[in-house]
Amino acid sequence: MIRRKEVIRPMKAIRIFRRNVANAFKSIFRNFSLSIASIICTTITLVIVSIAMIVSVNVNSFTKDLASTLTILVYVDKNATEDDINSIKSKLLEIKNIKSDELLYKDKETLKEETMQKTDKNSSLYSIMKTWTKETNPLESEFIISVKSIEELEETATTIEKIDKISNVQYSESVVKKMIPVFDIVKKVTIAIIIGLIVVTIFLICNTIKLTIFARKNEIEIMRLVGTSNFVIKLPFVIEGLFLGIIGSIIPIIATIWGYIISYDKLEGYFFTNFIKMVNPMPTMIYISLALLLIGSLVGMLGSYTTVRKYLKI
């Protein structure tokens, strides 16, 4: 007897699921104009969400690239001993925003050789540098530092300046002060757009499902009178919302993949200037497409479920 129940219950659940899927499809075609309106609104919304996500991804990528190119030059006092330099290095490694694996030290003799390699051998500067000895070399040893977050670059530079035997700290302060606020605004705007559009999509699907519920009031009342469970009554509407969300996300997914690939090829991988590099289409567009499908599906289901609970009071 127990074994029979274990076999029947899964089969019954499958039959209920199949029947509700069929009912969801029937409801979509029965209310075709409403379904089309919901799908179109979902499509338009997800296209804008896709654009916002693409902008956000590229801004984040550009921020990381900028962080990797922006460095802090730390000049060591000429009178610093070997112990002083080791002490400075230890203190630098204690600063959280500094990439410890990319910390580079160059003594003044190394800097002299590098400068001579880049200087014309027939120039007077080259002749002068050639006469420098270890004692007369006027250059200062330096640490070249890469940071993890450009937002904390100024704070990091201030902390470094307080270390003993540091003569000077240099970084592109003007670039950082101009770029960081722009990045923050773009990030906040894109997040606000995505959240706002998701809310609009939920509202549109809620209205579509609401009208469907009113059109099927008598059918629902009969189902409740014969003892149909709340779950069974809710399920077709949730599945209907799921299908509306999935169908509405198909065009945005296609537009996202092909549109970005075409734009990437036309612009040769750069936004208007060689300074701003675009993110490679793959696998980024696949991730964004999956995100759109997930958003469409969840929004459709959430909109349907919320409406069923509110208007059916089951």
Image (tube, helix red, strand yellow):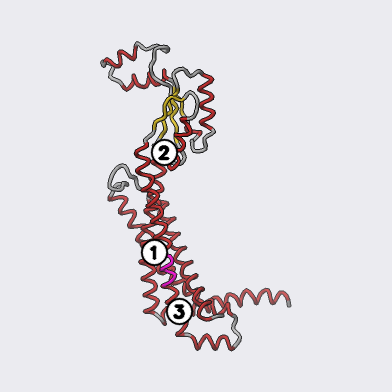
Mark 3 or mark 1, earlier in chain: 1
- Amino acid type of disc 2? Ser
Which residue in the protein does label 2 denote? 68
Which one is earlier in the sequence, the residue at label 1 or at label 2? Answer: 1
Q: Residues within 10 Å of mark 3 (few under 14, many from 20)?
A: many
The numbered dot on residue 46 is: 1
Which quadrant of the structure image shows residue 71? top left
Tag 1 secondary structure: helix
Which residue occupies the foreground of this view, 199 or 296? 199
Q: Is residue 313 above or below residue 43?
A: below
- With 306 as the anchor, is 185 left or right in this view? left
Image quadrant occupied by the N terminus: bottom right
Q: Quadrant of residue 295?
A: bottom left
Magenta: main secondary structure:
helix
Task: Name the kind of residue labelled 1 in the image.
Answer: Leu
Relative to the observer, which residue lies in front, 105 or 288? 105
Q: CA distance from mark 2 to mark 3?
A: 52 Å
Q: Quick one: quadrant of the C terminus? A: bottom right
Q: Nearer the viewer, residue 83 or 132?
A: 83
Q: Position of residue 75 (x, y in %)?
A: 42, 25
